[in-house]
Image (cartoon, coloured by chain):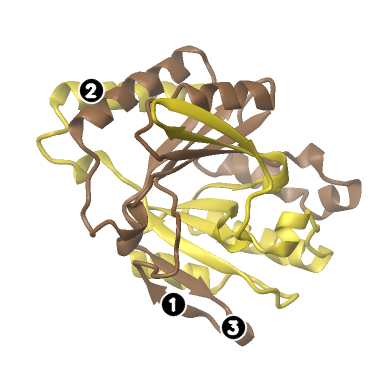
Chain colours: A brown, B yellow
Amino acid sequence: MRFMMLMIPKGYETAEPGTMPDAEGVAAMMKYNESLQKAGVLLALDGLHPPSMGARVTFPGGKPKVTDGPFAEAKEVLGGYWMIQVKSREEAIEWASRCPASENEIIEVRQVQEMSDFPPDVQEAAAGFAELQAQSGQSKGA
Amino acid sequence: MKFMIIMKANKDTEAGVMPSERALTEMGNFNEELVKAGIMLAGEGLHPSSKGARVKFSGGKQTVTDGPFAEAKELVAGFWMWEVKSKEEAIEWVKRIPNPDNTDFEVEIRQVFAAEDFGAEFTPEAREQEERLREQLAAKQ
């Protein structure tokens, strides 16, 4: 089973453009990343620039409307993620709990949809997707 | 530049409602276009938050809370990773996301950190460690 661990850092919703993680935090996180890698569970990971450098697009009445960040109404935002391959939801939660996260940070653990999770008619309609994923830069885990 | 295109949740995605066949077909065609344009790195959907959990770190302790989580519009339903030349290019592609059923949805565009974004705090040792990790991940795929 693949799970996504979504890092939600407190206060990142108001971080200035160009905000960087501090070196000490990064060093601790690199150790954690290596432990995930050594256990053979890590599939992918990325950190995200603050939302003040991003944008949101909504589609009122079917027309795209772009709003630049920061997003005033956002109470929490994503700071980064890990994609892991584990045997159970419990194992995913176990890994999330080991993260050297800072005070008031939250890691949300969410299962990734696999083609086999869908009913047969949906699988058929989405038949080309697995092939597309194989052609794209990042394939599914084992 | 690498961007994460976050498809925000709504009450349908949180309820586990399947998209229509037409929506799936049009999304399939859109994904194909992304691959042909050479910008698609990954794309995944997530199960509703009711199947998930949150771990909160506070006072040196971890507290686990089972889903679902309030405020569907702040939650993630799925994402793409795209390699594009600019934020504007990412926005142009986002504007073209098919929506044949005219559902209410929001997409967030966020730039991914790359090694070159960091200054001297990212020491040569740390850079090497990061590169090694990325190489191992790439080799696994």
Q: Residues within 10 Å of mark 2 (few under 14, many from 20)?
A: few
Kind of residue indicated by mark 2: Glu
Res. A134 image quadrant? top right
Q: Residue furthest front?
A: B59
State which tag comes first along the sequence, 1 or 3.
Answer: 3
- Mark 2–mark 3 Cα distance, whole angstroms, equals 46 Å
The circle on residue A60 is 3
User: Which residue: 80% across, 40% down?
Assistant: A117
Which residue is found at the position 68% from the left and 62% from the top? B27
Looking at the rendered structure, the secondary structure element under dot 3 is helix
Q: CA distance from mark 2 to mark 1?
A: 38 Å
The amino acid sitting under disc 3 is Pro
Q: Is residue A26 visible?
A: yes
Q: Is residue B85 above or below residue A28?
A: below
Picture coordinates of residue A119, whole percent (x, y): 88, 46
Q: Please name the residue shown 78% across and 48% down the image.
A: A127
Q: Viewed as shown, does residue A122 lie left or right of A70?
A: right
Kind of residue indicated by mark 1:
Val
Residue matched to label 2: B128
Secondary structure type for disc 2: helix
Q: Position of residue B116 (x, y in %)?
A: 20, 42
Specify whether disc 2 shares its chain with disc 1.
Answer: no
